[in-house]
Amino acid sequence: MAKTKASSAKVALNLSRLTISQKISLARTISQAMAGNASFPAPPVAPADVAKAADALDKSEGDAKAARQAALLKTSQRDDAATALEGLLAQLEAYVQMQGKGDAALIASSGMPLRGATVKTTSAPAAPGNLVADSGAKAGEAKLKWAKPAGARSYVVERTANPNDATSWAHIGATTKTRFVAAGQPAGRAWFRVAGVGAQGQGAWSDPATCIVP
């Protein structure tokens, strides 16, 4: 009698490679397919619970998107305010230059620095700008890069899975460069932020940047 060949098919969810929306869609498909499925009469997790978890993640993702949009709006408003301030200072610069008539002491009395003079740093570095986070080539890696703020000699890097929780940020490294590879990170969506460190201490945190850690 011929022997029946054993089946070798295996499940392949590949969850670490899926986006949040793909995970939600997959979970709902599985929940519907397994509900009342006679081939799987006693699953360790109720299909209804999987559906509820998918709904909860869907809502959390919507909340996170709204928070990111609000943060983008705040950033835009900040940039507009910075542009307005720079415009006013530029007008004062032209006025002081005209009234000062090249007199260094007179110009210095306005509080404005002189061209060619060394400006002493009296405050910590500003927040690093243009922070970008990309998925790394290896599992558990994220690649970060940012613009150097004046006075920064080194940088500290933090990570969180929930940017809306101010207490969830955790230190993951330090560097003297404007690039950093965050290794050994949990797979999934993560947010990162960077702060410069100078002679006057640590400066403000950058706006968070996010990516999916493979």
Image (cartoon, rainbow, N blue to C red):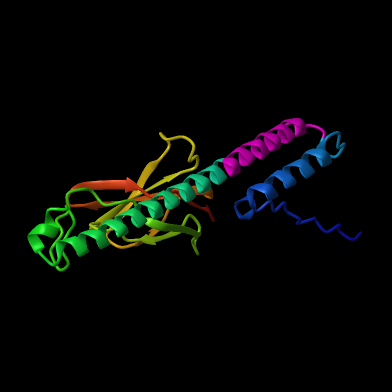
User: Which stretch did the figure color magenta?
Assistant: 41-66
Q: Who's the residue at 55% across and 41% down the image?
A: 67
Of helix, strand and loop, which mostly describes the magenta segment?
helix
2 relative position to 207: left or right: right
Q: Is residue 174 magenta?
A: no
In the rendered image of this protein, does residue 40 appear above or below residue 14? above
Q: Quadrant of the C terminus?
A: bottom right
In the rendered image of this protein, does residue 83 appear above or below residue 170? below
In the image as oriented, which residue stretches furthest toward the left? 105
In the rendered image of this protein, does residue 42 appear above or below residue 64? above
In front of the other: 9 or 124: 124
Q: Who's the residue at 38% across and 60% down the image?
A: 146
Residue 35, position as x, y percentages in the image: 83, 35
Q: Quadrant of residue 153?
A: bottom left
45 relative position to 87: left or right: right
Residue 121, position as x, y percentages in the image: 17, 53
Q: Who's the residue at 67% across and 39% down the image?
A: 58
131 relative position to 101: left or right: right
Q: Quadrant of the N terminus?
A: bottom right
Can see residue 186?
no
Residue 170, position as x, y percentages in the image: 38, 42
Residue 81, position as x, y percentages in the image: 41, 49
Q: Is residue 42 magenta?
A: yes
In front of the other: 102 or 212: 102
Can see residue 205?
yes
In front of the other: 188 or 203: 203
